[in-house]
Amino acid sequence: MGFAWRAMLAFRASRRHPALRDNSSRHDAGDGSPGFNMHRKPQIVYVVDDEKVIAETLTAILSGSGFTAKCFVDPLEVLEFAANSAPPDLLIADLMMPEMTGIELAIRTRQAYPECRVILFSGKADMVDILETVRRQGYDFELLAKPVYPADLLERIGACWGDGGG
């Protein structure tokens, strides 16, 4: 079974997940789809992965959960798009991409938009050491392991705003 199919099945299951049914952290998006109440404007989320199916699937999951999500496969396009339109409230990016790593993209995005929160994801276990080096430089990014399950992603997004971190 392919990644996109597994992700969509997991997304359907996540909508029934008890932690995601807590109405105190949700709002009605008006279209029957649940979304997070972040006590501010709707969240603009940029999803970046050089594997198009992953970027599209995560974008669909976030859009279905009430976020304004934009899909990118080229990290350089993210910087150009943000400069010419609404900047992201949240950047979700793969760590390993050909043109620019997720960490480089996260640092450049955070420099331009200090309030932007960042969640990086990777299928490689050795990325924790790289993130620790980046933390010593003053950047604190969240890390999710691939495969990214919808319930875990939505929970991590909620935690980014719930504790004021990110």
Image: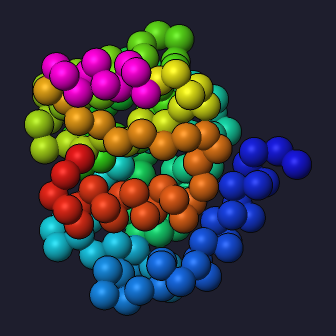
| Whether residue 24 is visible | yes
Q: Which residues are magenta?
A: 128-137
Q: Is residue 38 above or below residue 94?
A: below
Q: Where is residue 80? Give x, y as percent.
A: 29, 23
**Displayed quadrant of residue 101:** top left
Residue in the image at 49% along x and 36% along y: 121
Q: Where is residue 103? Give x, y as percent.
A: 35, 22
Q: Is residue 100 above or below residue 147?
A: above
Residue in the image at 35% along x and 26% along y: 131
Q: Is residue 46 above or below residue 124?
A: below
| Whether residue 43 is visible | no
**In the visual, does 147 lie left or right of 23?**
right
Residue in the image at 49% along x and 30% along y: 94
Q: Nearer the viewer, residue 76 or 105?
A: 105
**In the visual, does 46 lie left or right of 114?**
right
Q: Is residue 85 above or below residue 107?
A: below
Q: Where is residue 125? Give x, y as percent.
A: 56, 28
